[in-house]
Image: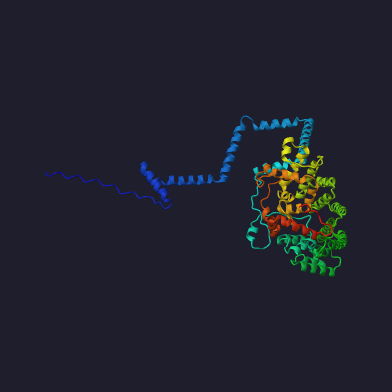
Amino acid sequence: MGPASAPPAPRSPAPLPVPPLSRRAPAAAMAEGSGGAASGRGPPCPGAAAALRRWEQLRRRAATPWARGLLAAAAALGLLYAVLRVPLRLRDGLAAVTMFLSTLTPKFYFALTVTSSFISGLIFVFEWWHFRKYGTSFIEQVSVSHLRPLIGGAESSPPAPAAFSAGENDTSRQNMPECKVWRNPLNLFRGAEYSRYMWVTGKEPLTYYDMNLSAQDHQTFFTCDTDALRPSDTVMQKAWRERNPQARIKAAYQALELNNDCATAYVLLAEEEATTIVDAEKYFKQALKAGEMIYRKSQNCHSQSPQHEAQLRRDTNVLVYVKRRLAMCARKLGRIREAVKMMRDLMKEFPLLSMLNIHENLLEALLELQAYADVQAVLAKYDDISLPKSAAICYTAALLKARAVSERWVFPFRFSPETASRRGLSTAEINAVEAIHRAVEFNPHVPKYLLEMKSLVLPPEHILKRGDSEAVAYAFFHLQHWKRIEGALNLLHCTWEGTFRMIPYPLEKGHLFYPYPSCTETADRELLPTMLALLTHQFPELMVIFAKAVLRLLWPVSAPSVLASS
């Protein structure tokens, strides 16, 4: 027999079909394939894949913030229930509280009322003491400095851009944050003072932005909706919008031809056509006569309609403006007591118009009279936490404290840090130093003008509080008052820089006021003339001599001693 033939090899079974992977990511499929090969198991069944997908969907939904919040709330409620259910027995606790409240006698409520009143009185006394000592509210300071950052009181939206005049720097101006500007309470006269400066120097003392703000003020205060009913007021409404001074003056004369009692026309002529203070005063007296007559008529019919109420507000603004400028004319012409009386009467007649800062005109006139007791009375009324501060208020308060120090010295007062460190500071000196630090924190630009480290220029018609423009306006009129008090400038010179040792980062954190705003530099650049600022900083001695000559031209009747000893 031949060799036996080998048995046939067994057949391998046919491969099973692989499920499609169209709904799964390639990477996931590869991962599962490799995992299956490693584990020795085949691909998962369709039911397990669906369960995995549902689990992933639930996990993604649970990862959202609202789902997490619901889970946290549910967990907190469950924990609270677990904690309170057994030991406290909410129902029994509520019954116990009800029983306790029902057993309270009137003596308890009386004692509670007395205790709360006593604590409130202590808080009030402490607030009063803190305000008298530091010039600010303790509660307000704590809430602004500590509580406001905790509750998210920081500004969440960027500040609105300020509206400036057209020019080559429009982009940078639009990006500048908004800084509120105020009408300068002691602003000069356009024709009698600013124009005379321009005649001498050939340079415009006011910027376009400053004059544009004045035009907006005039349209706000001296116009109303009923001007279309009177031809003269219609002409004046157009006159306030004119950019050319000669066109404005011509329109004022046209209004007087239509109505000889047009008060706003006399105001425009007094501000812009009069070349001396005496001529301006004549125009303002005519405006006062016409304004009082119109004001009485508006008072009689102001309740008839909203239009008549708007007309009364306009006539009130005109009358207050005219009386204030008449008082300023009397101050410039040397009739200071008359000016003080007019300002007091005006503040008494219109007590609600404190936002016009007429008290700052009164402070300057009283300082010229050296009526320091009256100055202190005005400060006690207007240096209040509810009213906006100003350099005039803060630095006048510091000046009075410095005067109190100089009065205690028999020989000429000369303060020095070396002497103070040896003997210590008296109570009056401590109060004066604290007042100076408070003033410097409010406006750090003023000391350099008062100490004549910077030369003065003509103040603008608008100022930025806590800015360089406010410092120029204050020092221009108040430098003479600081020089009159022996040792006041010396005390300021020795102590004002100590403010920045107390507040090393004034842009981030303040002590008695809000942090110093960072937008003042750019806004002041729009208010102060560039060439004048450049000249005064580059050639201070020459500009002092030049300023003296200009001041003699501006006040030929009674020249102030603003730069007399510079």
Residue in the foreground of this view, choosing between 399 and 175: 399
Name the side, left or right, on which 28 lies relative to 2: right
Residue at the extreme left: 1
Q: How is the image coloured?
A: rainbow
Q: Is residue 439 visible?
A: yes
Which image quadrant for residue 373? top right
Name the side, left or right, on which 300 lies relative to 13: right
Who's the residue at 76% across and 40% down the image? Answer: 431
Residue in the foreground of this view, choosing between 207 and 484: 484
Q: Residue 454, percent across and down?
A: 71, 52
Q: Is residue 127 visible?
A: no
Q: Residue 219, percent across and down?
A: 77, 62
Residue in the foreground of this view, choosing between 78 and 174: 174
Relative vertical location of residue 181 with respect to residue 1 in this rendering, above or below: below
Which image quadrant for residue 266? bottom right
Which image quadrant for residue 546? bottom right
Name the side, left or right, on which 45 lies relative to 272: left
Relative vertical location of residue 503 with respect to residue 520 in this rendering, above or below: above
Relative vertical location of residue 290 with respect to residue 136 in this rendering, above or below: below
Q: Residue 67, percent across and down?
A: 56, 44
